[in-house]
Image: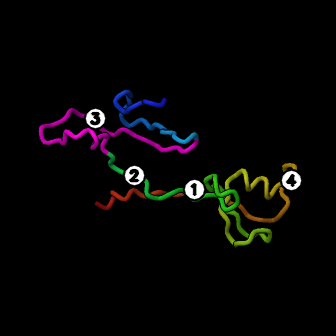
């Protein structure tokens, strides 16, 4: 899709799209409004598309591989250096399981982040 521009798209309002670059870096994009230009609107093409919000919080990464997003909080594990460790599912499974069997008595909980919109209080 090299050479694809926003003007080439036919987006649906409110429908989530995923913008992927560098092979595996994904960004959620949602078109929330479309309208014709008004006489008071800026005519500079570099001001469009208008970005309303951006996610300033980066996802927490796995403490083991440092690449994947954290999906599990591991606690009470004497084999880990910290009391609480964030891990991706792949690292958790390979570190705590052998042949599909759990090899230690650690506790694990699903981890997800709540991202607050900075514009909610304005």
Distance from disc 3 to disc 4, alpha carbons, whole Å, reads 53 Å
Residue 122 showing in the rendered view: yes
Distance from disc 1 to disc 2, alpha carbons, whole Å, reads 19 Å
Q: Up-down: is 68 above or below 13? A: below
| Mark 3, secondary structure of its residue | loop
- The numbered dot on residue 34 is 3
* 24 sits left or right of 27 in the view: right
- The numbered dot on residue 54 is 2
Magenta highlight range: 24-50
Magenta-drawn stretch contains 29: yes
Residue corresponding to mark 4: 98
* 74 sits left or right of 78 in the view: left
Distance from disc 4 to disc 2, alpha carbons, whole Å, reads 41 Å
* Front in this rendered view, residue 2 or 88: 2
Q: Residue at the right extreme?
A: 99
Kindly identify the residue that appears in the image at 12 percent across and 38 percent down.
39
* Front in this rendered view, residue 110 or 51: 51
Number of the front mark, 3 or 2 = 2
**How far across and down, in percent of the image, does residue 98 sit?**
86, 53
């Amino acid at each position: 899709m090299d050479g694809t521009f926003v003007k080439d798209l036919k987006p649906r309002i409110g429908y989530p799209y995923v913008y992927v670059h560098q092979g595996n870096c994904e960004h959620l994009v949602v078109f929330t409004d479309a309208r014709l230009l008004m006489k008071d609107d800026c005519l500079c093409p570099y001001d469009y598309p208008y970005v309303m919000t951006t996610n300033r919080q980066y996802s927490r990464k796995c403490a083991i591989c440092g690449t994947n997003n954290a999906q599990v909080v591991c606690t009470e594990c004497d084999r880990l250096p910290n009391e609480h460790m964030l891990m991706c599912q792949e690292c958790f499974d390979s570190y705590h399981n052998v042949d599909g069997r759990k090899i230690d008595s650690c506790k694990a909980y699903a981890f997800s982040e709540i991202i607050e919109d900075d514009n909610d209080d304005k």
